[in-house]
Amino acid sequence: MNILSLVPVEWKKIRRSKIFFILVLATVILWIPSILNADFNFGMQAEGISPENNFFIQGFMAMAWFIFPATMVVITVLQNQTERSNHGILKMLALPVSTAKLCMAKFIVLVSFSAIQFLMSIGMYYVSAMIAGSMQNYNFMLPPFFIFKEVGMMWASAIPMLAFFWLLAVCIQTPIFSIGIGLTSVVPSVLMINTKVWFAYPMAYPFFVITSEYGKLATNLEMDQVELIPWLPVAALITVVCLMISCIRFGQAERR
Amino acid sequence: MSFVLELRKVKRTGFLPAFLSGGILAAAVPALNMAFRSEMYVGMNAAPVNILLDANWQMMSMLNILLVVAGACILYNTEYADNAIQRMCTLPTKESTMFFGKTAVLITVSILLLMIEAVSVFGCSIHWFEESADLYMETLKNFGFFLMLMLPTILFSLVIASVSKNMWISLGIGVVCVFVATMIPSQNFVLTLFPFALPFLTLESHTADVIRNYTVAGAVETVLIALLEVMILKVRRSFE
């Protein structure tokens, strides 16, 4: 079986998981304060950012710093638990399918979930921009091209982080450790984006991308800008190493 | 009895090591903060404990809450994973006894967690600030208050964990609740009564009257959540 036919199989497994309910809940809750506090966007003269830009940036900053990485950890738990309950993984390992491909198919599902969450956030962004706009009599909507470009960059920068979470989920058999390390590693990203070595910490990437965009849009605010040179090679290296180790380790604990 | 039993159940889940290492991680926050930029804090005109908590408590309490949420999920996952809960239900004990046994376990490890952090805050105060006579009392008072406000969080996360059979749903709801708590403005009394928002509060951030209200509210919430869980269990049992 090739990887293209394995991915739909993995998708089907989590069909009844109710994970979408949690994703929707997270996305809706994310935008409620933005709607309620929409008038704050007009008081940003000190930063020099326009209300519509501020509305967009604040919402996605809240998403990138905690709720997005945390829901991704939850999805790795979901993927692991559905296989482990009733020993489903043992049956999968008995099939003539290479474990590395199986592991990659699951990772692709994880990556597509992150894309879905970003798409849902864009949808909710437009809904809440509409509501806030009619409340404040101001047009908060930004052109879709700009939004998709920014969010696309955030999504791409999240892939090394996802690879790291996937490594945790595959290699650490005790669930409390993989969950605990995943969730606690999210918390220091606020500190990491202000240091010189932010590019060595994949959990901070999406947050860094959005804060640097904030610095660009706000004329009076200096934020560190994205420098591709140490970042891209390091990010690629982290992704490749994490995925390689997880492909090698996948299913080893069960095959003992 | 139930407490000892619940403690035995978590023996091989890595529950205790997780809380120990989480406590050490949270304890490292003020130490690292002081080691790297002590000049920002040393000159400030306030009690050392308050300076330290003001600078670091947000991050430390965030770590605490995440650990409590993950811990609660694991406590119930051991029951749900291989349908062990069905066997528990056939025993001549109440389901709520199990819940309160798990609560006792989670409270005990949370006290351990807070103790590690208190030692760290105390040590940082002695190392970087001048020693003052009431440092012991200050530290004790603050962490007593933290424990008081952590009780509703502990119970509420256990309620969430007990409701769903699937760990990802309880973990997902827990994570969303933590996220809601981070967005609640700390000066709004009614909104901060949300169980997950309480542990972010510090003694210094409010006047004595408000603090008293919070302590009472925390105790009331703890009792209410416990009653809620007993009701949930009763209703669920009658529908199974």
Image: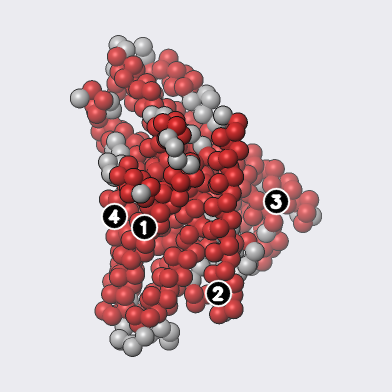
Task: Name the residue at 35% across, 49% down.
Answer: B1
Compute the Cα span from label 1 to label 3: 49 Å
Dot 4 amino acid type: Ser
Dot 2 amino acid type: Ile
- On whether disc 1 and disc 3 are found on a single subunit, the reply is no
Q: Secondary structure at mark 2?
A: helix
- On whether disc 4 and disc 3 are found on a single subunit, the reply is no
Compute the Cα span from label 2 to label 4: 30 Å
User: In terms of depth relative to the viewer, which is nearer, A231 or B113?
Assistant: B113
Compute the Cα span from label 3 to label 2: 40 Å
Res. B211 mark: 2
Asked whether disc 3 touches disc 2, contact meaning CB atoms under 8 Å apart, the reply is: no
Dot 3 amino acid type: Phe
Task: Name the residue at 63% across, 61% down.
Answer: B191
B18 above or below A108?
A: below
Compute the Cα span from label 4 to label 3: 45 Å
Q: Give the quarter of the image for residue A250.
A: top left
Asked whether disc 1 touches disc 2, contact meaning CB atoms under 8 Å apart, the reply is: no
Residue that badge 4 annotates: B21
Dot 1 amino acid type: Thr
Q: Depth-wise, is mark 4 or mark 3 nearer the camera? A: 4
Query: Residue A55's x, y, as percent?
Result: 63, 54
Query: Residue A173's x, y, as percent?
Result: 29, 36
Chain of residue at mark 3: A
Q: Earlier in the sequence, mark 4 or mark 1?
A: 4
Compute the Cα span from label 4 to label 1: 15 Å
Q: Give the quarter of the image for residue A236.
A: top left
Chain of residue at mark 4: B
User: In terms of depth relative to the viewer, which is nearer, A189 or B104?
Assistant: B104
B240 above or below B143?
A: above
